[in-house]
Image: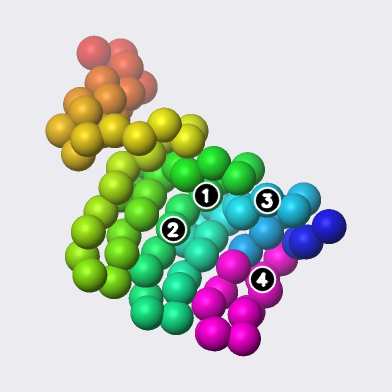
Amino acid sequence: MKNGLIVGNDGAKRYYKDGQYHREDGPSIVSARGSKYYHINGKLHREDGPAIDRWNNTKEWYLNGKEYSEDEFNEIMLKKKLKMLGI
């Protein structure tokens, strides 16, 4: 079972936990071209920006493996912050 950082022959960096893409403090995959993918327990997930940030500047937003538009993502995160503040 894969765990930790594995650097591919192409220079891509991939982080694993229990055989799944996983990293809590940064992208779980950084491609040789610079695209970044964020996973938690094998699911695309990022709460502070796009979970996919490609080298060509295209972006995709995911929470727990579910894709959202940028507007949907921002609304969800705003509601979460307001709930944390008790508002």
Give residue 13's position: percent from left, percent from top. Answer: 56, 74
The amino acid pointed to by label 4 is Leu
Mark 3 and mark 2: Cα distance apart in space: 13 Å
Task: Name above or below for residue 50 compared with residue 12.
Answer: above
Q: Which mark is residue 20?
A: 3
Q: Please report contact status of discs 2 and 1: CB closer than 8 Å, yes or no.
A: yes
- Do the residues bearing badges 4 and 2 touch, measured as CB atoms within 8 Å? no
Q: Which mark is residue 39?
A: 1
Q: Amino acid at mark 1?
A: His
Q: Tag 4's secondary structure?
A: strand
Residue shown at 51% from the left, 65% from the top: 29
User: In the image, 52: left or right of 12?
Assistant: left
Closer mark to the observer between disc 4 and disc 2: 2
Amino acid identity at mark 2: Tyr
Disc 3, disc 1: CB below 8 Å?
A: yes
Residue 52 spot, x, y in % from top left: 36, 54
Under circle 3, the secondary element is strand
Disc 2 to disc 1, C-alpha distance: 7 Å
- The residue positioned 46% from the left and 53% from the top of the image is 38
Quadrant including the C terminus: top left
Q: Quadrant of residue 75?
A: top left
- Work out whether 36 lies above or below 51: below
Please report whichever mark, 3 or 2, sits nearer to the chain's N-terminal start.
Answer: 3
Residue 85 is a magenta residue: no
**What residue is rendered at 66% in x and 71% in y?**
5
For mark 4, what is the residue? 5
The tag earlier along the polypeptide, 3 or 1, is 3
Cβ–Cβ under 8 Å for marks 4 and 3 = no
N-terminal of the pair, mark 4 or mark 3, is 4
Mark 3 crowd level (few <14, some 14–19, many ≥20, 10 Å Cα): some
Magenta extent: 4-14
